[in-house]
Amino acid sequence: MDAMEALTTRRSVRKYKQDAVPAELIEKVVDAGRLAASARNVQPWEFVVVINRQMRAELAEICEYGKFISESPACIVTFCHDTKYYLEDGSAAMQNMLVAAAALGLGTCWVAGDKKPYARTIAEKLGVPPDCRLIGLVALGHPADTGQRAPKRALSEVLHLERW
């Protein structure tokens, strides 16, 4: 699948088959995150892959809107060292992973992290050093349903040439 097809067909998936995601595919997805653009090429990201069912269930319980993490076969938790542009850099890495997963036929759903009250709890549970900030969690697996992608605003509604 080419990049444009992955971008136009990607959607948030909240129901997963229980089939394990091969380690090679998980590594490809994380590698896509590693290759993201970052301000001044700082590359502040760190990725914790959680496959253990009990740990995924604990993470899901902590997150207010990520209960489906317990049902996904894997979860990629993205942290960034607390640099000036950690949130922008980490978000770029997460978006790369979402698109890469779609290109590989996998489903994902981004669960917010940075501004959530549970951010430090997640970090501590995963043994992350205190200088790292939680960017978000990505549930990852083979989609269990082929639901529709959420509607997106038309290009004509969001594109402004030269001025607003």
Image: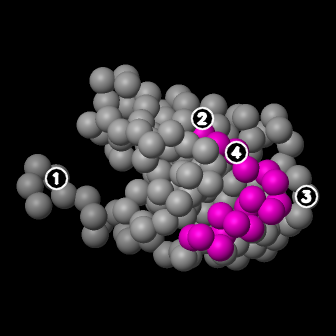
Task: Report, in whole angstroms, how far the alpha carbon at label 1 lies from the one at label 2.
Answer: 31 Å
Tag 2: Cα neighbours inside 10 Å, few (<14), some, or many (≥20)? some
**Between tags 4 and 1, which lies in front?**
4
In the displayed orientation, state which residue is furthest to the left.
163
Inspect the image, locate mark 3, and give the three-letter code of the amino acid beneath it. Answer: Asp
**Between tags 1 and 2, which lies in front?**
2
**Between tags 4 and 2, which lies in front?**
4
Q: Label 2's element? A: helix
- Asked if labels 4 and 3 touch by Cβ distance under 8 angstroms, the answer is no
Magenta highlight on residue 158: no
Q: N-terminal of the two: label 4 or label 2? A: 2
- Asked if labels 3 and 1 touch by Cβ distance under 8 angstroms, the answer is no
**Between tags 1 and 3, which lies in front?**
3
Q: Which residue is mark 2?
A: 32
Inspect the image, locate mark 4, and give the three-letter code of the amino acid beneath it. Answer: Val
The residue drawn where x is 70% and y is 72% is 68
Could you say which is closer to the camera, residue 100 or residue 141? 141
Q: Position of residue 69 (x, y in %)?
A: 69, 66
Q: N-terminal of the two: label 1 or label 3? A: 3
Q: Label 1's element? A: loop
The residue drawn where x is 47% and y is 57% is 120
Tag 4: Cα neighbours inside 10 Å, few (<14), some, or many (≥20)? some
Inspect the image, locate mark 2, and give the three-letter code of the amino acid beneath it. Answer: Ala
Q: N-terminal of the two: label 1 or label 2? A: 2
Q: Which residue is mark 3?
A: 19
Inspect the image, locate mark 1, and give the three-letter code of the amino acid beneath it. Answer: Leu
Q: Label 3's element? A: loop
